[in-house]
Image: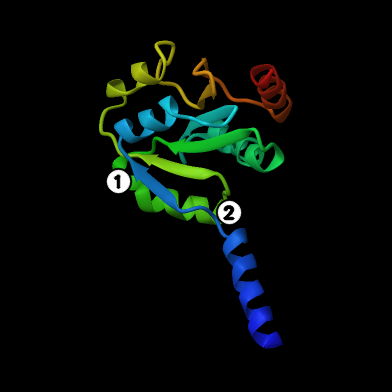
Amino acid sequence: MMKKIVFTLSIIISIQLSAQEVEVVKFSDLQKKILYTDAPLTVFNFWATWCGPCIKELPHFDALESENNNIKVYLVSIDFQSELERVKKFVEKKSLQSDVLFLDEKDPDDYMGKVSNDWSGAIPATLFVTDLGKTYFHEKAFTKEELEKTIKKYLN
């Protein structure tokens, strides 16, 4: 009996410590997540494996949800369609815990303006959405301190 309990606990722990799966989504799926958020603050961080500033700030975003129950985080990869396996390996290697979405779209011009009219196409880019539907868009890389300050501002 004790061996079964230890074995079961070790499986549960290993599952919890493993990285998130990468969910492949079309923009319409992402748009539903943006429009129908139920967390006090939902964060959509747009990034790519080939973007240095994105990779540098990613740990700050990945830690948000575990540090604050009022926040839901989606890490939205806009890597090229042919790079899905690369993204999956990256997520596993980095042990990312936030929900990772792989945006399966051919032309960024088709969705950028729908995310924000202010999006020129540069990344990293982040969309903050309150539970009241108010949105804030930032086309910049965040330091940990800047992100914490921004989160406090939008949660109040």
Residue depicted at x 47% and y 41%? 49
Looking at the picture, tell me which residue is in the foreground, 83 or 61: 61
Q: Horizontal placement of 11 versus 125: left or right? A: right
Quarter of the rendering containing residue 58: top right
Callout 2 crowding tier (Cα within 10 Å): few <14, some 14–19, many ≥20:
some
Residue depicted at x 59% and y 25%? 141
Residue depicted at x 34% and y 35%? 29
Quarter of the rendering containing residue 17: bottom right
Q: Position of residue 83 (x, y in %)?
A: 35, 46
Looking at the picture, tell me which residue is in the foreground, 134 or 107: 134
The disc at residue 131 is none
* Callout 1 amino acid: Ser
Q: Horizontal placement of 150 versus 48: left or right? A: right
Badge 2 vs badge 1, beta-carbon distance below 8 Å: no
In the picture shown, does residue 33 fall above or below 92? above
Of marks 2 and 1, which one's residue comes earlier in the chain? 1
How far apart marks 2 and 1 lie (CA) works out to 22 Å
Callout 1 crowding tier (Cα within 10 Å): few <14, some 14–19, many ≥20:
few
Looking at the picture, tell me which residue is in the foreground, 17 or 143: 17
Q: Position of residue 79 (x, y in %)?
A: 38, 38
In the picture shown, does residue 114 fall above or below 49? above
Looking at the picture, tell me which residue is in the foreground, 65 or 137: 65
Q: Position of residue 36 (x, y in %)?
A: 43, 29
Residue depicted at x 48% and y 34%? 47
Q: Helix or strand or loop: what does disc 1 sit on?
A: helix
The disc at residue 82 is 1
Look at mark 2 in the image and give the residue it sits on: 95
Quarter of the figure that contains the C terminus: top right
* Callout 2 amino acid: Ser
Mark 2 vs mark 1, foreground winner is 2
Q: Horizontal placement of 13 versus 74: left or right? A: right
